[in-house]
Image: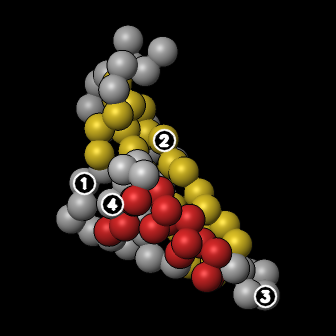
């Protein structure tokens, strides 16, 4: 069971997707995706901010998915492992 969430580094808001494990022992990378029409994705990101889940700037910039009128945003978090 994860003990706590640690916010992702905010130095680069661009999308960073890697397949490498977390660089620090005792931490695992968790990615949360929101996929859909741009307006809906933005509404979800802002609603999660309003609920205190994540700052808007912590999410990646909208990225095209390859489907018409669809984008995705990614939130990267780290969880402590036991």
- x%, y% of residue 47? 49, 62
Would you say the residues marked 3 and 1 are in contact, meaning their CB atoms lie under 8 Å apart? no
Q: Identify the residue under disc 4.
A: 55
- Checking the image for residue 9, the label placed there is 1
Q: Residue at x 61, y 62 (%)?
A: 34
Disc on the earlier residue, 3 or 2 = 2
Q: Is residue 62 visible?
A: yes
Q: CA distance from mark 3 to mark 1?
A: 31 Å
Q: Identify the residue under disc 3.
A: 68
Q: 24 above or below 82?
A: below
Which one is closest to the eye, mark 2 or mark 4? 4
- Mark 3, residues whose alpha carbon is within 10 Å: few (<14), some, or many (≥20)? few
Q: Identify the residue under disc 2.
A: 30
Q: 69 above or below 26?
A: below
User: Which is more toward the observer, 19 or 53?
Assistant: 53
Disc on the earlier residue, 1 or 4 = 1
Would you say the residues marked 1 and 4 are in contact, meaning their CB atoms lie under 8 Å apart? no
- x%, y% of residue 13? 33, 70
């Amino acid at each position: 069971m994860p003990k706590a969430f640690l916010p992702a580094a905010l130095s680069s808001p661009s999308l960073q997707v890697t397949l490498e494990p977390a660089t620090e022992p005792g931490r695992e990378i968790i990615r949360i995706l929101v996929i859909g029409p741009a307006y809906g994705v933005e509404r979800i990101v802002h609603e999660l901010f309003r609920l205190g889940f994540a700052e808007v700037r912590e999410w990646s910039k909208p990225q095209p998915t390859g489907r018409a009128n669809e984008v995705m945003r990614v939130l990267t978090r780290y969880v402590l492992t036991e």
